[in-house]
Image (cartoon, grey):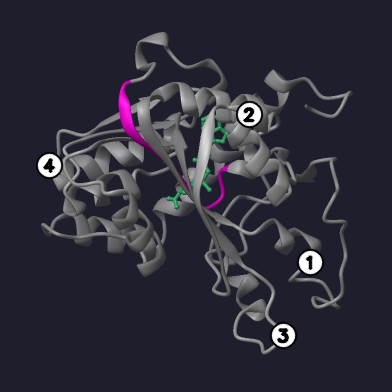
């Protein structure tokens, strides 16, 4: 549920504007150059060990995959080198979908990209995929998590799998760039969204502010219960000590008293 004074469509529209405005910063980066050079070479993949192992557990070779909120398509295009035969990337930011199409020209795959709000997808996508993939930094843009999982489960054929590789919600209890980054700053159970006007970048660059965006905290329980309510059986759930977040969160990595920093989940559509 969205906070009572916020309309769901206003939130998704605001987030879309903020992501579109941030897209040029992502293109003007070393990471973009790495992707351009990488996808020109067969076998290139951006997946780390954790995601690779999780996808191996599910078995993705020869499968059809939909990535929900695919951003610039780097992961959709990486699927090619892991044996995926059909893939679709969805994202509501036309600026990032344009970047994905550009990388696809370089990678020369027949994978597809679609610009669409996940809460308003075309009906012809229903039950079309063996695997739905959700990675780093997607769940918290979702104002209505139960509805989001219903939509994602609806994309899967019966027996299909949802694979999530996400940041751990416990990290939202800390403010890594504050004076006291190791003090608990926010409740794990906070419901109100974090509202930000900073451009959405990953590497800590100083860039101009953009319009407001809304980041919705969800607990691990919210994630598990959202999947279960959407008819997904939890087949695997793992937490990890390493960071898959923006660089400022690296300060929480590598401690003896370690907080969980990310998680994977595999769900099977019953
Ligand atoms: C952090 S990015 C995902 C990055 C991706 N996991 C990766 O590692 O390359 C989050 C994406 O979610 C998209 N998004 C947010 N709300 C959405 C919605 N309602 N429908 C579709 N896409 C949405 C944004 O446009 C953005 O590209």
Taking the image as drawn, is residue 111 in sight?
yes
What is the magenta range? 128-138
Label 4 CA crowd tier, 10 Å (few <14, some 14–19, many 20+): some
> How far separated are the C-alphas under marks 2 and 1?
32 Å
The quadrant of the image that shows the C terminus is top left
Element type at marker 1? loop
Residue bearing the label numbered 2: 229
Q: Which mark is residue 257?
A: 3
The quadrant of the image that shows the N terminus is top right
Q: Nearer the viewer, mark 4 or mark 3?
A: 3
Sequence-first tag of 1 and 3: 1
Taking the image as drawn, is residue 14 in sight?
no
Is 80 a magenta residue?
A: no
Label 3 CA crowd tier, 10 Å (few <14, some 14–19, many 20+): few
Q: Nearer the viewer, mark 1 or mark 3?
A: 3
Whole-percent x, y for residue 104 in the image: 22, 41
Whole-percent x, y for residue 227 in the image: 58, 36
Sequence-first tag of 3 and 2: 2
Sequence-first tag of 1 and 4: 4
Q: Is residue 238 above or below residue 142?
A: below
Please name whichever residue, 213 or 54, is drawn nearer the observer in this view of the structure: 54
> How far separated are the C-alphas under marks 4 and 2?
39 Å
- Drawn side of residue 200 relative to residue 267, left or right: right
Residue at x 79% of width, y 27% of height: 2
Sequence-first tag of 4 and 3: 4
Q: Which mark is residue 98?
A: none
For the residues labelled 1 and 4, say whether their Cβ atoms are less than 8 Å apart. Answer: no
Residue at x 60% of width, y 42% of height: 139
> How far separated are the C-alphas under marks 4 and 3?
46 Å
Residue bearing the label numbered 1: 175
Element type at marker 4? loop
């Amino acid at each position: 549920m969205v906070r009572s004074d916020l309309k769901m469509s206003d939130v998704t529209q605001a987030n879309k504007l903020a992501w579109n405005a941030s897209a040029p910063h992502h293109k003007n980066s070393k990471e973009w150059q790495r992707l351009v050079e990488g996808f020109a070479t067969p076998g290139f993949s951006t997946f780390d060990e954790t995601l690779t192992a999780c996808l191996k557990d599910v078995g993705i070779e020869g499968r059809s995959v939909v990535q929900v909120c695919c951003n610039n398509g780097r992961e959709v295009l990486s699927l090619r080198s892991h044996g995926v035969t059909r893939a679709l990337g969805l994202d509501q930011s036309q600026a990032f979908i344009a970047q994905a199409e550009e990388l696809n020209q370089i990678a020369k795959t027949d994978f597809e990209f679609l610009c669409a709000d996940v809460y308003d997808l075309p009906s012809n996508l229903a039950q079309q995929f063996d695997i739905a993939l959700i990675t780093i930094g997607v769940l918290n843009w979702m104002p209505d998590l139960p509805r989001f999982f219903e939509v994602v489960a609806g994309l899967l054929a019966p027996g299909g799998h949802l694979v999530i590789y996400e940041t751990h919600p416990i990290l939202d209890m800390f403010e890594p760039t504050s004076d006291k980054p190791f003090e608990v700053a926010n409740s794990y159970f906070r419901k109100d969204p974090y509202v930000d006007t900073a451009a959405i970048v990953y590497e800590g660059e100083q860039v101009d502010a953009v319009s407001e965006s809304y980041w919705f905290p969800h607990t691990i329980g919210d994630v598990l219960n959202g999947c279960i309510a959407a008819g997904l059986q939890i087949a695997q759930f793992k937490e990890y000590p390493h960071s898959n977040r923006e660089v400022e969160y690296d300060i929480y990595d590598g401690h003896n008293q370690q907080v969980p920093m990310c998680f994977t989940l595999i769900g099977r559509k019953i």
